[in-house]
Image: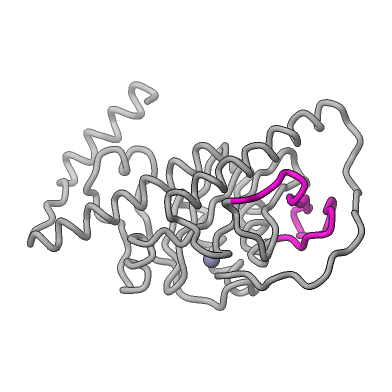
Amino acid sequence: MSEAVSSGRKATVNRLVADPERELLRARARQELVEFGRRAYRAGLIPGLSGNLSIRVAPGEIWVTPSGVNKGFLAESDLIAVDEEGNLLYSTGHRPTSETPMHTAIYRVRPDVGAVCHTHAPYATAFAVAGLDLSEPILPEVIIGIGPIPLIPYATPTTQEVARVVSEVMKSHQAGLLANHGVITVGRTLAEAYARMESVESLARIVAISRALGRVNVLSPTEVERLLALVNGHGM
Ligand SMILES: [Zn+2]
């Protein structure tokens, strides 16, 4: 959802573990959050104050985008660190994204996930608004790189309820559509989570156009099996 404009600035909080190696990871994470925020904004995926990104640099240390700031124009100093329960570890005065509970809930159930990307990508969100998923096997690269993209039932954005519903589905999926809200993807890195976001949006656009043309051919179970065998056999 769009995030409320923050009211007033507070002093810097810093409860980060002092560790030179960790500091290198933090520096890279901050650069990536700024860079991918800019890309997502330019691509029209996070209009206004919508969308949020996060990176887990180490167990118990997650860097997130701030609330009330357009993510196309972030500065590294705007970024915030929280632990996996959402407790503040670092901030120069911004509040963490109001969707922090959704991010931290996913990290708690997915130890393999290093980044979470949430946008309001218009075509994919249109499917979510129409109550449609993107789970049919249509494009090989999506079948291989993401798998089925379910529709996650609506829950009020920013609440613990949305965190619970979304993390339950994301235990076993790499991407999901949030009913009447937006899209969420995960990855080992932010580059991977963001690439999945682009693929979901591209798929949604292609399916919408194909439906307008009057026909969507779905790949057969045999073709899907062949694809998955290819991936498993050759480590694509
Ligand atoms: Zn949202």
Residue closest to the eye, 185 or 74: 74
- Residue in view at x 83 percent, y 70 percent: 8
Residue closest to the eye, 212 or 146: 212
- Residue in view at x 36 percent, y 51 percent: 200
Above or below residue 180? Residue 198 is: above
Magenta segment includes 16: no
In the rendered view of the protein, which quadrant contains the N terminus? bottom right
Above or below residue 207? Residue 21 is: above
- Residue 132 in the image: state x and y as whole percent: 30, 68
Say how the picture is coloured. Answer: one colour
Residue, far front: 73
- Residue 214 in the image: state x and y as whole percent: 7, 62
Q: Which of the 4 image quarters holds residue 10? A: bottom right
Residue, far left: 214
Residue, far top: 234
Magenta segment includes 95: yes
- Residue in view at x 33 percent, y 23 percent: 233
The mark total stands at 0
- Residue in view at x 90 percent, y 54 percent: 12
- Residue 40 in the image: state x and y as whole percent: 49, 49
- Judged left or right of residue 206, residue 93 is right
- Residue 111 in the image: state x and y as whole percent: 64, 44
Residue closest to the eye, 146 or 192: 192
In the rendered view of the protein, which quadrant contains the C terminus? top left
Q: Which residues are magenta?
A: 73-96
